[in-house]
Image (cartoon, grey):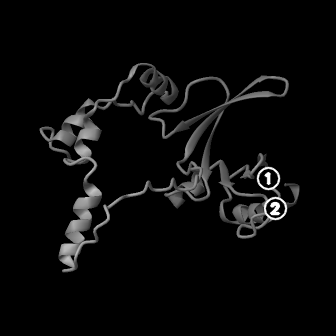
Amino acid sequence: MLDPGSPVGAFAGQAPRLNPGTALRPQVERLLAGYLPPDGPAELTTSVPGQAAALLRRLFYELLALPEPAPPALLGPLPLPSYQPTHITVPLRVLTRVLGPAQVAVTRYCDPPHEPAGEGGIHTAVHEDTLDPGLLDLADVVFRHSAADDHRLGSPAQWTAEVLARHRSAHWRPTWTDQAPVPCAPAPDSC
């Protein structure tokens, strides 16, 4: 719990709030359209902007009882970490509606407070690596993200056979490859 009287507490108190019980996209779009972040975070980062390298180097050399080198202390920018796309592992309630020939609308809900409203079929989709493995037994769909030739997980057919044996309540087991989902029906040889 943050002290509301502290600078960080004051900054957090100004931050916009999202309502988890309503659609996320309209909330984020409203925020992006009109929100201006306060200047607080930059001011809270340091009390001596631009001097961190010199102050830290001086301290470390003093602690080591060594003379500090004469050249100025400089910090190069840190490289960006390599991009690693995130994978959704939270269980989803999914509403599907047939819109017409070869046209289906899919709407996913993360932990909705009530059943999604609307016409169509509703099912529970759970990522194989979910934080709560007990939810896999309740899943209508078990899915994973991987390259089609990922030798650690085996082929889509091998993975499907294993998932079928472990999670008998699941009806459909798609594997997301680098290009597209590979649907796996209830029999491993029909992937």
- The residue shown at (34%, 31%) is 17
Residue 67 or residue 181, whichever sits in front: 67
Against 177, is 164 above or below?
below
Q: Secondary structure at mark 2?
A: helix
Q: Is residue 77 left or right of residue 155?
A: left
The residue nearer to you, when weighing 39 against 159, is 39
Instruction: State the SS at label 1.
Output: loop
Which quadrant of the structure image shows residue 60? bottom left
* Label 1 Cα crowd, 10 Å radius (few <14 / some 14-19 / many 20+): many
- Foreground pick, 120 / 179: 179
Q: Which residue is mark 2?
A: 157
Task: Say which residue label 1 marks.
Answer: 184
Image quarter in which the C terminus is found: bottom right
Q: Pointer 2: residues within 10 angstroms few (<14), some, or many (20+)?
A: some
On screen, residue 165 above or below 146: below
Tell which circle, 2 or 1, labels the residue nearer the N-terminal end. Answer: 2
Using the image, tell me which numbered label, if any, was put on residue 136: none
Residue 107 versus residue 77 in the image, above or below: above
Task: Tell me where residue 53 appears, x and y as whole percent.
Answer: 29, 59
The residue that appears at 31% across and 61% down in the rendered structure is: 72
x, y percent for residue 5: 12, 38
